[in-house]
Image: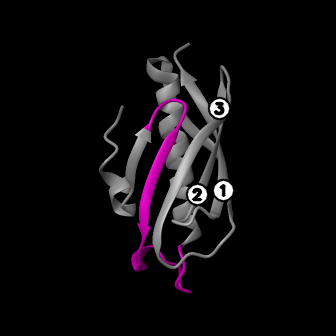
Amino acid sequence: MPNLTGGFVALLGLTIDEVSGDRVVIRWKVRPELHQPYGIQHGGVYCSVVETAASIGGALWLGDKGNVVGVSNQTDFLRAVRDGELTAVGTPVHRGRSQQLWLVEITDADGRLVARGQVRLQNLTAA
C-alpha cells in the first residue's frame, strides 16, 4: 500500500481513521485555504476526498491482484460548510472482476449529510 500521509492527502489535511477493503473513514478540518471565493468548502475538495476514500478501499480489496484507477466520480454538494470538521465514510456498492463502485458520504460534526459521491474504479489486473 502506498504512503497515505504525504502528497495530496497532506495538502488537504486528511486524517485517515479507518481503512479496509470494506470501509474507509477520513476526517479533515474545513479551513480558509480550502474555501471557494464565497467562503465555503470548495466542491473540488469533496470530489477529491470521495475519490481518495474509494480508491483506498478499492485498492485494499483488490490487494496484490493489481491496481485500481478511478474512471468516474460523481459527487453532489448538499449543504454549504464554512468551518468545522467533516467525516467521509466510503463503502462498496459493487465489487466485480473488472470494476468496483463505491459510495462515499460526507457528514458534518452534527451528523448532517453535506456531500455524497460515488466513484467507479477500474481493476487493473495482470493478464
Name the mark nearer the viewer: 2 or 3: 2
Residue, x 54% and y 79% (percent of image)?
40
Magenta region includes residue 54: no
x%, y% of residue 20? Answer: 47, 32
Magenta region includes residue 37: yes
Question: Which residue is nearer to you in this view: 64 or 93?
Answer: 93
Instruction: Quickly name the residue at label 2.
Output: 106
Disc 2, disc 3: CB below 8 Å? no
Which residues make up the magenta segment? Answer: 19-41
Dot 3 or dot 1: first in sequence order is 3
Identify the amino acid type marked 3: Gln
x%, y% of residue 50? Answer: 56, 52
> Looking at the image, is 27 positioned above or below residue 91?
below
> Tag on residue 100?
3
x%, y% of residue 114? Answer: 63, 65
Residue, x 42% and y 41% (percent of image)?
18
> Tag on residue 116?
1
Quadrant in the rendering for residue 28 = bottom left
Q: What is the distance, in whole Å, between disc 3 and disc 1 at their CAs?
A: 17 Å
Q: What is the distance, in whole Å, between disc 2 and disc 1 at their CAs?
A: 6 Å
In the image as oriented, which residue stretches furthest toward the front? 110
Identify the amino acid type marked 2: Ile
